Amino acid sequence: MKRALTIAALLATAACSRADPAAQLAAAQHAFAAEDYAAARSDVLAALDADSDNREMLLLLARTQLRLGDGDGAQSTLSRLEDAGVHTPELMRLKAEAAILRGQPEAALTLLGQGGDAEAWRLRAAAHGALDDAPAALEALRRGMAVGGQNYDLVHDYAAFLIAAQDFEGAGVTLQTLKALGPKRLDTLMIAGSLATRQGRLEDAKREFSAAADAFPARVEPLTALASLADMSGQVDAALALVARAAKIAPAHLEVIELTVQLASEKGDWETVRKTLVGQETSLDPRSGNGMTYAEALLRLGHPEQARAMFAQALLLSPQNPYARLMLAEAQLAVGDAASALRTVRPLSDSVLAGPRELDLALRAAKAAGDPMAATIAARLQSPQLKLNQQFAATGQAAFNRQDWKAALAAYGQIPGHENDAEVLRRMAAAAVRTGDTDAAIGYADRALAMAPRNADMLHTAALVRLEAGRDREQMLRLMREASHLDPANRLFRADLARAVAAAG
């Protein structure tokens, strides 16, 4: 009798401890509404343990997996729903979104077919974006806004696209719609902070990101955004503390890894960089921040040959990237190829914007190669004008950051020889067009392009000033296409190409 009572008690305890699937589903729905998608996934999986064929639970699981970027998991869940006889338009859209996450944008476009509602146009835009077809992506976003400008996710994606394209006025208008649709949602706060950051309103950005971090403590995005702001302000230790908080939430999150690598490099902690990225060498884009930081870590840790190969590939893919050029020259010098190092660094050291680092590297390379120009470089390093040039350049960059375009023009215009330096002229063109002086902007940009006709940055700026001025549309479109062709991975170039195609009609 006693044994029977004990067994009954154990069974009762087990029954009480077993999760109630209805309660778990309710908890998952609440977490999803609160945008805590990790918790939502955990809760709905627990509910499915007790009711594995529940269609409502499976649909919520698929939507949660998509929010977490788990395309493979979502595809598996959606297949279970199809096997259960679910074949709704929503399911097709979810399958299309999963296909995009799985690197199959063409399949997504096939699933979406033609026409459709705002959500279908949003997904088409995402698919075109994955195919690097920015003009088609922008067209899809605009068509979606025309048929359903009250779709929150669509409005968010449109605002993000406009920010990437530096259409800050358009992004500001779209942000107001986003705030009307979801004033307290995470993406609204993040878009507001992102726009403020790009406009140089860093205190406003910090306020938006801080509000997001307080409202969504289980999400890493506000913390990484705040860390980036702290890093921009030179507060590296504060940035590290924020990244550490984010890592406790999602250590494998892409932004957490990128910031861990970036901040470690700023601290000179090259072993942390190596340990964080080791094993990813074959998948790293050599021109990406992680790719080049890993290459620098190899150089600093005594592997210059490997570093040289990686930086050579990065510079081949992005020949206008000054960091890739500088680091390739350092790697070439480290392996004893001083003549190549000098040739590589000269476009930087010959510029009126050259600072002590570029000139010192050029001097070391020239001495090692026995090149007579070493004396000239040494004289520049000792010249009082070098410090003045650096002050003017820093003043100009600071004015750019706060969008004081006239001050930027004045600062760069004081650098002796600026009229013969393509990079300074490019910056002056970008500032002049924002003051409304389009004739001067086009003049600066065209002179810069004449000096460096195959430089993607010069091509882009010559196109951009015409785009902003609404002039020379055919030439503007040709220049923008050339820039994108030379640097197809550049998100800004892709976004501006889309705007250029739309403007050219």
Image (cartoon, grey):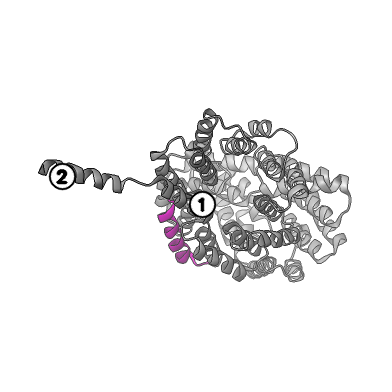
Q: Earlier in the sequence, mark 1 or mark 2?
A: 2
| Residue that appears at 78% across and 49% down | 146
Q: Position of residue 396 (x, y in %)?
A: 69, 67
Name the amino acid type tagged 2.
Thr
Residue 71 vs residue 441, the one in the foreground: 71
Q: Position of residue 173 (x, y in %)?
A: 74, 61
Q: Is residue 244 left or right of residue 59?
A: left
Badge nearest the viewer, 1 or 2: 2
- Determine crowd level at label 1: few under 14, some 14-19, many 20+ residues with C-alpha closer than 10 A: many
Q: Which residues are magenta?
A: 234-251
* Element at label 1: helix
Residue labelled with disc 1: 32
Main SS type for the magenta part? Answer: helix
Q: Is residue 50 above or below residue 350?
A: above
Q: Is residue 403 visible?
A: yes
Task: For the N terminus, give its image quadrant.
Answer: top left
Residue 373 vs residue 315, the one in the foreground: 315
Task: For the C terminus, give its image quadrant.
Answer: top right
Residue 76 vs residue 6, the one in the foreground: 6
Q: Position of residue 301 (x, y in %)?
A: 41, 48
- Determine crowd level at label 2: few under 14, some 14-19, many 20+ residues with C-alpha closer than 10 A: few
Q: Is residue 75 left or right of residue 484?
A: left
Q: Is residue 158 above or below residue 284?
A: below
Residue 6 disc label: 2
Q: For residue 8, which quarter of the picture?
A: top left
Q: Would residue 244 be counted in the magenta stretch?
A: yes
Residue 275 vs residue 270, the one in the foreground: 275
* Element at label 2: helix
| Residue that appears at 66% across and 46% down | 490
Q: Is residue 452 visible?
A: no
Q: Is residue 282 left or right of residue 437?
A: left
